[in-house]
Amino acid sequence: MIGRCLGKVGVGTGIAFALLAAPRTAAEHPPGERPALGPNRLLQHQIADGTLSLAQVRRAGLRIFTLSFNKLDGFGDGPMDLNDTLSPGGRPTLQGNGTFLRVNGLDSQSCGECHSLISAATVPPRLGVGGAGGSVANAMIRPTAIDADDSEDLDGAAGFDGRFANPPFVFGSGGVELLAIEMTEDLQRRRRRALANPGQVVSLVTKGVSFGSIVADGLGNLDTSQVEGVDRDLVVRPFGRKGQFTTGRAFALQAMPFHFGIQPVEIVGEDVDADGDGFFNELLAGEVSALHAFMASLARPVGGPLGEEARRGRELFGRIGCATCHVPELTTRGRELPLRLPEDPLDAEANVYLRLDLSRRPAGFERAGGGLRVPLYADLKRHDMGPALAEGAGESGRRGNRTFTTARLWGVADTAPYLHDGRATTLTEAILLHGGEAEAARDGFAALADASKADLLEFLRSLRTPRRPLRGSAARVSTSP
C-alpha cells in the first residue's frame, strides 16, 4: 500500500478512494490548480479485498484512460540526463518548451487522445474510448536522426532511424490476453517434456499454431534454434507490434512513462522521484490495476452479416492462404482472465487479485464449452514481413526491423489506415505490401480476378468494431482466495 488510509472520500464519480498520507510533491500547488488524478487515490487493496465493485473499478479505469495528466501529476521528465537522452526520465523537450517532445514520447496527455477512433469508415468518423488512432496519432519511438528534407541522398525516402507506430484499438484485449496465457502454459508444458526426454524433438504447437520445435540434451540444455515467432523463453507476448508485452498491464507500465513521463510506483518504487521532476507516487499500483481491468473488459469486435459476395470472399480468404496467419478464430479453455500483481509470465495463477468473466458484458465473448471463441483473425505469432515493410530502427534478431506480430483483422473495416505505421490507406494497399512469410498469400490475392478481389474485400469489410464498446454491465468478478 502507498501511504495509509485516512478514510473514504467521495470524488464525484460514485467511487470512494483512500486519501494518501504522503504528499505527491514537496512543492505547493499554484492557487486554484490541482493534479488531474486529484488528491484521493485508488489503492490496490481496495480492489483486491472487494471494497469496490468491478463496475466501480472499471469506472476508475475509464477515468484514468481518458483524463489528461498535467504537471501536477508528474507529467513530463525531469532534468535532461546527458548519459541517456532517449529513455524516459531524462529526455529533452522540443525546442526547450519544457513539456512535450513528440519525437520519442512526451507526445500526448491521455490514452484517449490516441485511442479514440471507433470507425474511420463512417461519415463523420465515429469517435469513442478505446479505439484506434489516425496517422496523426502515430508514435515516433527512439529516433536519433530524421532526414526530413531527404538531403542526405535525395532518394525519395526521408530517413528515420526509429520506429513509427500507428495506435491499434483496445477492444477485445481481454480475450487476446487470455489466449496468450493459455498458449504460454501449453508451450511451457512442452518445454518441460523436452527437458524430461533428452534427444526427443518436441513440436511447439498450441491451439493449432506452430512455434517450431525444441530438443534438449542430456545435460539439461535446451536447443531453441528451431523456435519461431516467439521469444526463446516460450512466453507468448500478444501486445505491441513486435510482441513485447504479455498483458495490458505490462503495456501500460511502459506506455505511461514513454508517452506522458508518468512513472508507475511498481516500476520506480514508493516515494521515489526517479526522474527528478519533483513528484513521486505518480501512478499507484491500484490505478494501474483499474486501468488494466477497464481495458481487458472492453467489448470485442464483431462480424457483420455476410451477403453472397462476402461469403465468397471468406472462402477465398482461406483458399489463398490468408488464414494461415490470420487465423479466423482461436478458442480458450477457460472464461476467466486472471489479473495479477505482480505478474509472473510463467505462472498465471500467482498473485491473482481479480478474475474477469469475459463471457459477460461488456467483453461479451461467445462461449464454447468451458471456454470462449475469440475471432481475432491472428495467430499471436511474429512473422518476417519482408523488406518493403522493414523499419529503420537498427534492431536485429528475432524482433528485427522486418518482424511483426500478425495484425488482428477483427474490426479491420473500421480502422484505416493499415499496417504497423499506417502507410496503407486502403485494404488493397495493405495486402500488396505484404512480403516475406506472407508473400505467397499476397501473390494469391494479386492473381485473383477483379471480381474475386472485390469479394474478398467485401468479406473484410464485414469485420467491424463494436458500435457501443462501453455498453453493458460489468463482467462478474471474484477476488482471489
Image (tube, rainbow, N blue to C red):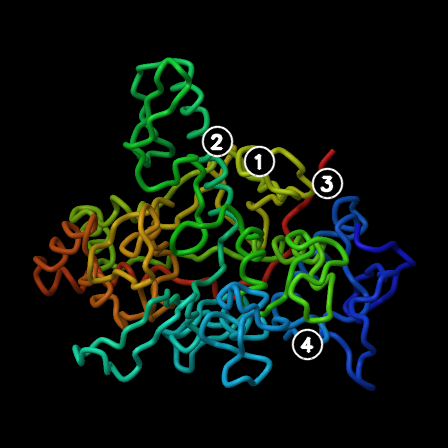
Q: CA distance from mark 3 to mark 4?
A: 35 Å
Q: Which mark is residue 479?
A: 3
What residue did someone put label 4 on? 71
Q: Secondary structure at mark 1?
A: loop
**Depth-wise, is mark 3 or mark 2 nearer the camera?**
2
Q: Quadrant of residue 240?
A: bottom left
**Depth-wise, is mark 4 or mark 1 nearer the camera?**
4
Q: Secondary structure at mark 3?
A: strand
Residue 153: x %, y % from top left: 18, 78
Query: Which residue is pictured at 57% across the width and 68% down the height?
Result: 81
Residue 203: x %, y % from top left: 31, 26
Choose the circle earlier in sequence order: 2 or 1: 2
Q: CA distance from mark 2 to mark 1?
A: 8 Å
Q: In screen coordinates, is 181 left or right of 393?
A: right
CB-based contact (under 8 Å), mark 4 and mark 2: no
Crowding near the residue tagged with mark 4, few <14, some 14–19, many ≥20 C-alpha atoms within 10 Å: some
Q: Which mark is residue 348?
A: 1
Q: In screen coordinates, is 240 left or right of 213?
A: right
What residue did someone put label 2 on? 185
Three-letter amino acid code at the position of disc 1: Ala
Q: Secondary structure at mark 4?
A: helix
Three-letter amino acid code at the position of disc 3: Thr
Three-letter amino acid code at the position of disc 4: Lys
Identify whether 367 is placed above or below 40.
above
Crowding near the residue tagged with mark 1, few <14, some 14–19, many ≥20 C-alpha atoms within 10 Å: some
Choose the circle earlier in sequence order: 4 or 1: 4
**Depth-wise, is mark 1 or mark 3 nearer the camera?**
1
Q: Is residue 111 visible?
A: no
CB-based contact (under 8 Å), mark 1 and mark 3: no
CB-based contact (under 8 Å), mark 2 and mark 1: yes
Q: Is residue 260 visible?
A: yes
Q: CA distance from mark 3 to mark 2?
A: 22 Å
